[in-house]
Image (cartoon, rainbow, N blue to C red):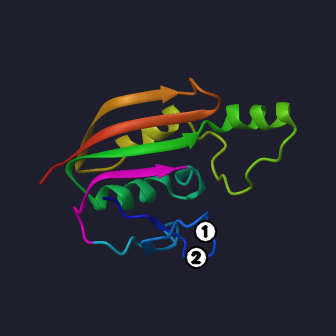
Amino acid sequence: NCDGIDFPQPYTYTGKDQVDIPCDVINNEIPVPDNVYDYVYTSHLIEDFVDTKDALKKFIRVLKNGGNLILVFPDQPIYEVYCKNLGIPMNPYHIHPDMGYDFMLKKLNEIPGITYETLFSSNCEVDYNVVMVLKITKQA
C-alpha cells in the first residue's frame, strides 16, 4: 500500500494513475500527520526546492522513526553535460547548480534531531542520477 502525493490532476495524469493526496509539496506542508510512513520515495523533485533542507524536513516529518527515505535526483553538473551532449533542453526548474551527492549529504547533516544510515547509494553510476536510500532515526 502506498499514497501518491503530487500536484492534483490533470498535471500528474499518466494513463489511469490517480493522485491520492493532492498537494503542491514545494509550497505547502504535506497534509499528513507526523510519523505515518515506513518509506518516503521522491524522484526528481528535491532539486526543484529553493530550500533543500526544508524539503528534507517535510519528507522526514511524515516518515516513521527508523523509516527509509529514498531520494533520486540529478547531479546537476553531469546533467547539464548530458543534456548538452544529446542536444536536449535542461529542466528549467532545477534550482541548485551544485546539486549532487555531496550537496545532499551536506543538507542532511544540517538537520538537527536526526541521524541516518546509508543503506544504498549510487552516485551517477547510471547516467546523471544520484540514488540514496537512508534509514532515518529521529532523536526524542
Main SS class of the magenta portion in the image: strand
| Outermost residue to the top | 125
Question: Quick check: 36 left or right of 73?
Answer: left
Question: Quick check: 126 left or right of 25?
Answer: right
Instruction: Tell me the number on the disc at residue 106.
Output: none
The spot of residue 63 in percent (x, y) is 27, 56
Identify the residue at horizontal 32%, vertical 31% (top origin).
Answer: 118
Out of 127 and 94, give the one closest to the viewer: 127
Quadrant holding the C terminus: bottom left
User: Which element type, helix, strand or loop, lies under badge 2?
Assistant: loop
User: Which element type, helix, strand or loop, lies under badge 1?
Assistant: loop
The spot of residue 11 in percent (x, y) is 63, 71
Instruction: Tell me the number on the disc at residue 13.
Output: 1
Q: Amino acid at mark 1?
A: Tyr
Residue 131 lies, with reference to residue 140, above or below; the image says: above
Magenta residues (range): 33-43
The reply to whether the C-beta atoms of the residues labelled 2 and 1 are less than 8 Å apart is: yes
Question: Quick check: 9 left or right of 38?
Answer: right
Residue 40 lies, with reference to residue 18, above or below; the image says: above
The spot of residue 34 in percent (x, y) is 24, 66
The spot of residue 14 in percent (x, y) is 61, 63
- Report if residue 38 lies within the magenta region: yes
Q: Distance from label 2 to label 1 (Cα)?
A: 6 Å
- Report if residue 39 lies within the magenta region: yes
Number of numbered tags placed on the structure image: 2
Identify the residue at horizontal 63%, vertical 75% (top origin).
Answer: 10
The residue under label 2 is 9
